[in-house]
Image: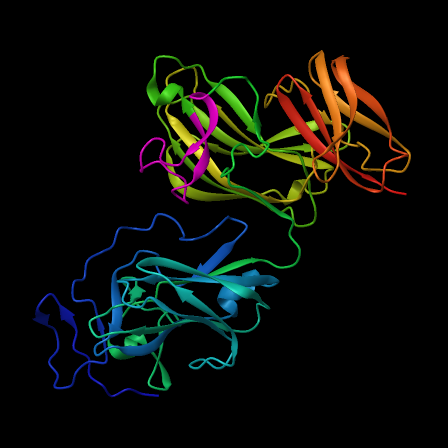
Amino acid sequence: MKHSVLVVLMIGVSLLFSAVETPVFTQCPDITLSKPVLSEPNIQHRQEDSTYYCSLTNYTGIGLTSGGSFEMAIRLTPTQLGPFAGYNLIAVVFYHYDGSSTSGNAIIYDQGNATTPGAVITTEPYSGITGWQRVDLTTPVPITGTTDLWCSFSITHAAGGYPGGVDGGPMVTDGGWIYYNGAWATLASFGLDYNWQIIAIVEPGGPSNLVVWDFETGWQNWVHTNGQTFPLGWGVMDSHLNGNQWICPIPDDSSLWFDDNAAGGSSYNYKDSVLSPILIPDTNTNWLSYGVSYRFRNTGEWLESGLKYYNGSAWTVVPLVTYTASVQGIWDSVDVSAYKTNQYVQVYFYYDDGDQRGWYGCVDNVSICGTIAGGIEDGEIGNARGTFGFAPRNITHARNQALISYIVNHPGHVSLAAYDETGAFVATLVDKENQAGLNTARWDCSRLPAGVYFLRLETEGRVAGTKLVVIK
């Protein structure tokens, strides 16, 4: 549908065009560049991905001159969706410029034609104020990669409001659709050469066994290897530990930090690894993703992310990404699909200050697909000094007798106890000195009722856990 309405565009107080009709849509008259967005907004973890047309840097806001209702939308074609065939659309995000519309609906439309969407697939209400607004879909929308999807937000606001955030343009095909007064049109048809700040969030379809460590409840069974304590070591701290500039992409929460003696003290010579719980990989173990921030100081220091894998006989260390320059609150993702056929994998991060005074950094929202196996690998990266935890092939089910295998890396006192599903103590299996290496304990569970039991292994302040299912 063609629109014959002339548009008056106001920048400051200067008229660019003269007209006798009141413009339907106007942009905020105070046009200034917003603070640049340093990363994709509201990505919860990097197993998620996104597609969009905008620049992610908000330029101004768009609204109806006299107030009212409209929809702002983008059309995603197979060009954008093809790479995500088999994924699900799980959320949509838009930039709310001035808070003039406090609620509305996110709407996902099916394929229609090049200028009009098809039927509504799902509608999700939202409420929020100024800034990036993420709306998670209660029912994810499967992506075929061969048909269109339209992502829209319904807006209602009063006169003088400019709720719809846009970038600085120019408008690209399908980046700026408007539904108003019963018809679809583009921003460009109103003389507004911009793209809506709308982002589609997608995630691999099917069961994913996604594990996310957000460090909001402490270490979450990660360990570090050299005994150094924070600040000359790793520690879970608030994201604003060293000011607002060097934070992970999701601020105002906890992160896993290293700090070379409070970022510049007199003591250094810091080399330390942190290790995740051991994971059993599966067919979806394709990406390791995390947020990272690192303030680099001197040549010779570095931060490294990596993966360890166990092939049934030995552990192998695989460095993945080495950071030798500052990175400021970014998301990073690494393809780890080559290692998913191994028996076990484990994530690590390693920092080396190069024997000189360094600064600090942090990681957060570390995500990978797999199932936590229960044991904890405790070896210095590149110079493994043994393991601690339950043996890789430890028994998981028992009927009458359970032979439990575990590993300790130093001679010392070991405690191994069993608990039921309520956390009640059931039995002490080991409470004695053990030699380093592989040890075993036999548990007579013939008189126990069927169910799930939890085993707790402890030595030298380290703790590992696993579960055992008793069957009858």
The range drawn in magenta is: 230-258
Q: Name the image quarter holding residue 419.
A: top right
In the image, residue 241 lies at what x, y percent?
36, 31
Instruction: Judge left or right: residue 295 versus residue 23.
Output: right
Q: Is residue 263 above or below residue 117?
A: above
Give the residue drawn at x 54%, y 32%: 219
Is any part of residue 218 visible from this angle? Answer: yes
Image quadrant containing the N terminus: bottom left
Q: Nearer the viewer, residue 298 or 102?
A: 102
Q: Position of residue 284 (x, y in %)?
A: 66, 50
The answer to which of 382 and 38 lies nearer the viewer is 38
Front one among 433 and 181: 433
Q: Is residue 166 left or right of residue 370?
A: left
Is residue 179 one of those drawn in magenta?
no
Q: Is residue 5 above or below residue 288?
A: below
Q: Residue 378's quadrant in the figure?
A: top right
Q: Is residue 407 left or right of residue 33?
A: right
